Amino acid sequence: MLKTELCGIKFQNPLILAAGVMGSTASSLNWILESGAGGVVTKSFSINPNKGYKNPTTVAVKGGIINAIGLSSPGVKKFKSELKLINKKNMNGDENIAIASIYGSNSDEFAYMVNEIESLVDMIELNVSCPHAMTGCGAAIGQDSDLTYEVVKASKKATSSNTPIIAKLTPNVTDLIQIAKSAEKAGADAITLINSVGPGMKIDINAGTPILSNKFGGMSGPAIKPIAIRCVYDAYTNCNIPIIGVGGISNYEDVVEFLYAGASAVQIGTSIMYEGIDIFSKIKDKLKFFMKENDFKSIDEMIGYANK
Amino acid sequence: MLKTELCGIKFQNPLILAAGVMGSTASSLNWILESGAGGVVTKSFSINPNKGYKNPTTVAVKGGIINAIGLSSPGVKKFKSELKLINKKNMNGDENIAIASIYGSNSDEFAYMVNEIESLVDMIELNVSCPHAMTGCGAAIGQDSDLTYEVVKASKKATSSNTPIIAKLTPNVTDLIQIAKSAEKAGADAITLINSVGPGMKIDINAGTPILSNKFGGMSGPAIKPIAIRCVYDAYTNCNIPIIGVGGISNYEDVVEFLYAGASAVQIGTSIMYEGIDIFSKIKDKLKFFMKENDFKSIDEMIGYANK
Amino acid sequence: MNKIINNYEILEIKKIISETDTIKTFIFNWEMKEGRIPIPGQFVMVWNFLGKNDEKPMSISIIDRENSKIGITVKKIGDFTEKLHNLSVGDKLGIRGPYGNGFNIENIENKKILAIGGGVGMAPIACFTSYIGQKSNIDVVCASITKDELLFSEKLEDNSANIFTCTDDGTCGFEGYATHRTIDLLKSKSYDMAVVCGPELMMKGIFELLEDREIPAQYSMERYMKCAMGICGQCCVDNTGWRICVEGPVFSNKDLKKIEEFGKYHRNASGEKELY
Amino acid sequence: MNKIINNYEILEIKKIISETDTIKTFIFNWEMKEGRIPIPGQFVMVWNFLGKNDEKPMSISIIDRENSKIGITVKKIGDFTEKLHNLSVGDKLGIRGPYGNGFNIENIENKKILAIGGGVGMAPIACFTSYIGQKSNIDVVCASITKDELLFSEKLEDNSANIFTCTDDGTCGFEGYATHRTIDLLKSKSYDMAVVCGPELMMKGIFELLEDREIPAQYSMERYMKCAMGICGQCCVDNTGWRICVEGPVFSNKDLKKIEEFGKYHRNASGEKELY
Ligand SMILES: Cc1cc2nc3c(=O)[nH]c(=O)nc-3n(C[C@H](O)[C@H](O)[C@H](O)COP(=O)(O)OP(=O)(O)OC[C@H]3O[C@@H](n4cnc5c(N)ncnc54)[C@H](O)[C@@H]3O)c2cc1C
Ligand SMILES: Cc1cc2nc3c(=O)[nH]c(=O)nc-3n(C[C@H](O)[C@H](O)[C@H](O)COP(=O)(O)OP(=O)(O)OC[C@H]3O[C@@H](n4cnc5c(N)ncnc54)[C@H](O)[C@@H]3O)c2cc1C
Ligand SMILES: Cc1cc2nc3c(=O)[nH]c(=O)nc-3n(C[C@H](O)[C@H](O)[C@H](O)COP(=O)(O)O)c2cc1C
Ligand SMILES: Cc1cc2nc3c(=O)[nH]c(=O)nc-3n(C[C@H](O)[C@H](O)[C@H](O)COP(=O)(O)O)c2cc1C
Ligand code: FES
Ligand code: FES
């Protein structure tokens, strides 16, 4: 009853690991899949190895954390060997869905990356939304509707195998819908909403300085959920491609809220820190119970329920 | 030791009541002043009476609330009689600072309002930042740097008495600094950062619908503090006019954090709900203690401390 | 954060009692746990999400801790309350609360208490009377325009309170206003304290009576409400600035004296004053 | 939210002990309250906000509950640790934690325990040994390259543990590696369990020894860390995916067997594998 389909890809359940959270190795991704996620998104990676920012790279705030890890990755060449190790099925024999998150600073880089990895994963998520990425990357693209259009277009064009392309967008813009429509027009098969919020900063008053070495970073966790819900709701009303909801999910009620707002599936990141790896299996059980209680036969019936 | 000056206006202390919170009557404003605030900002008002949105207009979320009160006010004519009743001094004989928050949908309306009220208050704050205002008002202006420029310019031009004009800005834009610079160039004497965040939405999964009658509203409270701190920090680096910091302040540590980020004074809103009216006097005592412990002789010495 | 801000619970209407032609009581299951155990005089915000998507304050009229139930008693006077009256058992409403201070019920045992309720103002008064029960000796002045509108008089009689009904038109009990009935009672009886709820002009009249006789009293007020959390400032009163939703709705006679607008005016949704 | 995420405390260095030419112990006051009372094997993140504005993990080497103090013991091996070594008493560091699982110290009383520490790996081992104290019979193999680098051997002797030093160059105690010293000990003695920390290749050698003899053991591992909160995934190991900062840094011999990269490679800041 939790099964759901997104851009022709069949998920065992609508719970997906969010990009950048325990997503740097096949080992941790497989652990998450084994623990009950319907799919996983990798840490965002690009052509070259990148150490990311110096520590401190994360700091706890009320209702979540701020991070500026800085998109660390060993680069596409080495990361491909990780992708190959992601299990295609879990121990029960159910299909696992692997989504690669990639970034770059222009359409050529995105196209190159798509080409390199499309055969290794089920879907590709374009990170044009990281709020603390290096110059020209992440939100620098996704805060501009023309650049978003170009990058999505180029990425779509680069696929030879129909691997669905998802654009992950940032809420930190004046007009999200304009950007979402750009992505849709450029051929995105789905959009993921939202990447981390703000950016935010925490100053330690005893140290007298911002805590993160990058000074600011993206906010995630329960506190950002209302923003994510608004984004999903608005995009559902204004766009025609499926939406993957993400931001602050920590229990089944949150998942239902995202589905009701218009998400076809959801991603979970920061709450793993609070709730542990078994958050996926816990939510699955309770979600099934909720669906039975409320006479829902499928996830589909719940999508956009609150927009009616 | 808490005394501070902003645009030539002398405050007994840097703690100001934020706009829209217990600011609809002279009575409540006087109560707040008596309880220890250095100044108060009124609820935003405009030319005509406005009922605001239908209930529900507020909903609690993790780390704060979302509100879409909808700028309800009795209109300038009636509100002027409230302004006249705001006490010029508190019971100790200390100067109270009254700041009127006004809104409108174009420069003419702002100019008209400034003219109407400037003789009654110490400062005027332009609300070009409410994220759930009626068409053409609030963030509709403050999300566009040209409109912001026009409105600030017209408001400045309308003052005959040198009443300082403060532009209150929204963080819900792609490029805050561009807008802040616009306001500065147009002659704003100070900027207030930030109005409520998002906007955000909460869907009640049992009701199956967004809770607020306006569906979305502005987020406020502790959860938004990191965004406010980042905005203040950035504006302090990029602008040359004083900054009033607001967003999520609930204790003296938060006040220090804002001062360190670059604020010359701060406003407190939502935390009144959690902490009560005596939040001002509580913070004052602890702030003094902190300053003594850390050898600060004046608020001035703390401003921008973390930007060094 | 010190205060718990209760969010909505979507609750089924478990029972509806038609009290009068225009007044109905709605009963809900209510988990009695910390931060949400109501006391008489507190209110809830009622969200009719299916109807007009509006939300208004209602006093808690029934607190049944034993069976984990609460009730509200609603008089049909406009759009919102009419839509509530159209609901049936099994329909759902959003309820958040309890809010406000409620009646001060400390040291109330073995006191001679005068409780005065006018119209649907009987809701918190009945709640108070049932709650205090036999612990004190309570005389209840139960006032309404006409017999059909008398609220809770029978129920409270069962509760061992002494009921003194009065109707403007004399169709039941004393003919005349609650003030007159009270003057009458005060001639023969003495009281340690009083609790009062009803139309503000009625309360104003009672206030003057009781002040003259130096009887300490508590009054439950109504003002237009938006947040009910003490943030929006909509419900603040002149000249104290107090919030009816936090510092109120119940005020002692001492405090009420400082509320200069009492009996004179209140503010509507836009904050404009409306005279009584 | 279940887990408490401790934020920085900016703490004054109360005392600095020069253990060897390259190793210093730093002592801080530490409020021992729920969620922050450390156990041996746990670590803290140390933020040098004045220096390089970098932050790295350090094992807790001293837990003094009585005097509310903790200590870390730092070996100078690079830029960050060198800057730490330049600090003086009264300077401040940001400390958050404690993090990680720590040694499993349940049912550890009256056991014959072998504790093996190599180099600065003695930090958690010394902490463990002091913590367990006289409750068990502990033999400590204290290994280093040369005499001047031997860590905590004297301190632990005071603590009624039996110390078996060994140096690669024979300048103190046994001449040779910790593995050789251990083989030697195991000839004459039997143990109920072991705890081990040191360079990974040393631990690998010890692991094989102890597995052969079926002695249950716990090993404290190191991996590159960023968040230390279990979110960034930087410290995950192959093939289990476990996080050294949450599921580790201490693993039982049983679990260690599943960590295939143990003794083979680790990942650097960008996630590239580096072979041992
Ligand atoms: C603390 C408190 C307790 C109350 N308890 C009860 C009760 O137990 N039973 C009962 O029947 N009524 C009670 N009321 C009054 C009730 O809230 C109003 O009767 C109801 O809101 C009217 O709504 P309507 O749409 O039917 O009528 P409308 O025609 O919209 O309004 C009629 C009048 O009701 C008042 N009102 C409208 N909206 C609000 C609002 N959001 N907040 C406050 N007053 C409003 C105004 O004075 C208005 O003039 C209480 C009010 C308050 C403030
Ligand atoms: C759980 C744990 C406990 C530790 N306990 C101690 C201890 O008690 N005493 C001690 O002296 N050292 C300890 N370390 C190692 C210590 O963190 C490194 O020695 C230190 O970070 C080196 O920094 P550097 O700049 O001086 O040297 P660099 O030249 O920057 O690094 C030298 C080596 O240290 C390691 N390292 C660098 N940065 C990190 C990082 N952020 N996280 C993990 N490893 C890193 C890498 O393997 C690197 O090759 C511990 C490490 C971990 C993971
Ligand atoms: C530590 C951390 C690292 C992240 N790294 C990435 C990343 O590499 N790429 C990306 O698209 N999003 C990244 N994100 C954002 C998350 O995928 C997600 O959009 C965001 O955290 C909101 O979801 P949450 O509240 O469930 O964490 C990261 C978030 C965190 C907390
Ligand atoms: C109920 C409510 C009403 C508000 N009304 C206004 C308003 O009328 N004008 C305005 O400029 N800001 C208004 N705000 C925003 C606050 O002034 C402030 O910028 C924001 O709430 C962040 O501060 P806080 O977290 O301390 O509340 C309102 C906020 C709340 C919670
Ligand atoms: S209704 Fe908002 S303060 Fe009382
Ligand atoms: S250091 Fe981030 S998960 Fe362990």
Image (cartoon, coloured by chain):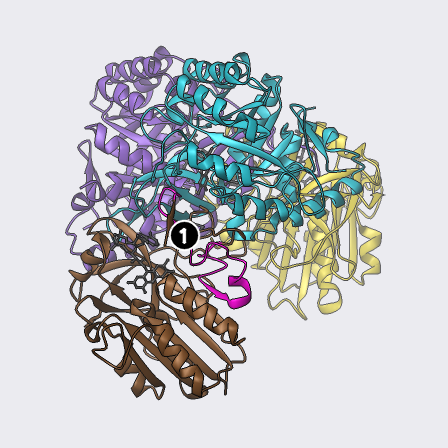
Chain colours: A purple, B cyan, C brown, D yellow
Say which residue appears at 54% left-offset and 53% top-offset: C240
Q: In the visual, does B26 lie left or right of B286? A: left
Can residue C54 be seen by looking at this rendering?
yes
Count of residue discs? 1
Pick whichever, D29 or B231, lies toward us.
B231
Residue B279 vertical position relative to residue A85 in the rendered view, above or below:
below
The answer to whether residue C254 is magenta is yes
> Foreground residue, A270 or D218?
A270
Q: Is residue D233 visible?
A: no
Residue occupying image coordinates x 42% and y 64%: C204
Where in the figure is residue C96, as x and y percent of width and height? 36, 58
**Horizontal and vertical percent position of residue A55:** 60, 32
Find ligand 2 in the image and state its quadrant: top right
Q: Is residue A92 above or below residue C174?
A: above
Report the chain holding disc 1: C
Q: Main secondary structure of the magenta part?
A: loop
Q: Which residue is mark 1?
A: C265
Which residue occupies 75% across, 67% down? D134
Residue in the image at 29% along x and 77% along y: C166
Image location (x, y in percent) of residue A19: 39, 33
| Secondary element type, mark 1 | strand
**Numbered range of the magenta stretch:** C243-272
Magenta run includes residue A244: no
Q: Residue C126 falls in which quadrant of the image?
A: bottom left
Disc 1 marks a residue whose amino acid type is: Tyr
Q: Would residue D103 be found to the left or right of residue B151 on screen? A: right
Q: Residue B202 placed where, x, y %? A: 34, 44
Q: Quadrant for the C terminus of chain A, please.
A: top left
